[in-house]
Amino acid sequence: MVAAHMTQATGVYYSTERRHPLMNPLEALNEKKVSCTGQSILLVCALRSVGIPARAVGIGTWGHIRGNHTWCEAWCDGEWKMLEFNEKSFNTPWVMEYVGMINPNIPFQRIFAASSQGKGGFFPTVWNFESRIAAEDVTERYLALSRAWYEKAGLPPHCQRLLVDISPRTDKVIHLLLEDEHGAIIDQAPLPTCRDDMRRAAALNLPRQGRHYLRFQGSEQRLEIAPTPAPVQPMLLNR
């Protein structure tokens, strides 16, 4: 596959030391150090050079961390498929995981594919907010891909995964309870402590139907929680 051997064939690799984030193919080949956007533009051109339709896809910011991302889509088997620089297969796992945490109700967290047939949308060029590259909104398709990825990873299709952190963290283990409207506990998990990795969170499965509440074990106070359209909902609770 063309994508799997891009660095090997061109010497171009991702680096935060690149001269600027947006490089055309000739700049990328000369500079070697590029951003994900430079990689994606080069990959799109490489695929097109061998007759494979391709286009750039991007998101302005992720839902759970700061930062944008750009990748590529290749037309294969009658549909657009997500592909990245140096990857051997479609639908890069970490991208599918991150897509699962976006909030599609926030405009800058929607996903756009560059397209001359774009219907009123524009590619999220975070390096130049005045840019107006026509694009197609493909957010819902990527949310569906992400949901399928999470289901294969063990998330029931009728549930949303809650990833809950607490601030401030303490050295005491506190269990977080998920209850239905009748007060029955349907899931529970320990919240991370100050000794845990910052990426750790309490993981709960929230049903998409019915009313549900979060409660610290030992407390009577409850917080109603509703699912979002994404496969995963990250949350930060304050003590």
Image: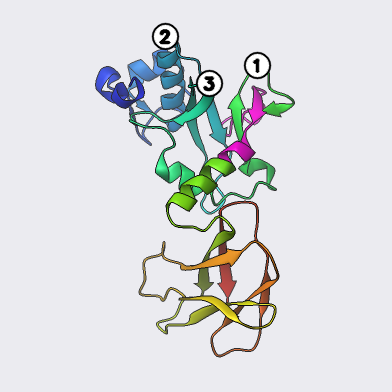
In reply to whether residue 204 is colored magenta, the answer given is: no
- Pointer 1 local density, CA inside 10 Å: few below 14, some 14–19, many at least 20: few
Q: Are marks 3 and 1 in contact (CB under 8 Å)?
A: no
Q: Are marks 3 and 2 in contact (CB under 8 Å)?
A: no
Magenta span: 123-142
- Coloring scheme of the render? rainbow
**Residue that sits furthest to the left in the current view:** 8
Disc 3 residue type (three-letter): Gly
Q: Secondary structure at mark 3?
A: loop
Expressed as whole percent of the image width and height from the top left, the position of residue 233 reads: 57, 59
How far apart marks 3 and 2 lie (CA) works out to: 19 Å
How far apart marks 3 and 1 lie (CA) works out to: 19 Å
How far apart marks 1 and 2 lie (CA) works out to: 19 Å
Q: Secondary structure at mark 1?
A: loop
Examine the rendering and report whether any part of residue 43 can be seen: yes
Expressed as whole percent of the image width and height from the top left, the position of residue 139 reads: 62, 38
Q: Are marks 1 and 2 in contact (CB under 8 Å)?
A: no
Report the magenta stretch's main SS: loop
- Pointer 2 local density, CA inside 10 Å: few below 14, some 14–19, many at least 20: few
Q: Vertically, is 170 above or below 77?
A: below
Disc 1 residue type (three-letter): Ser
Expressed as whole percent of the image width and height from the top left, the position of residue 183 reads: 65, 83
**Residue appearing at x 41%, y 26% in the figure:** 39
**Residue appearing at x 65%, y 16% in the figure:** 116
Q: Which residue is mark 2?
A: 49
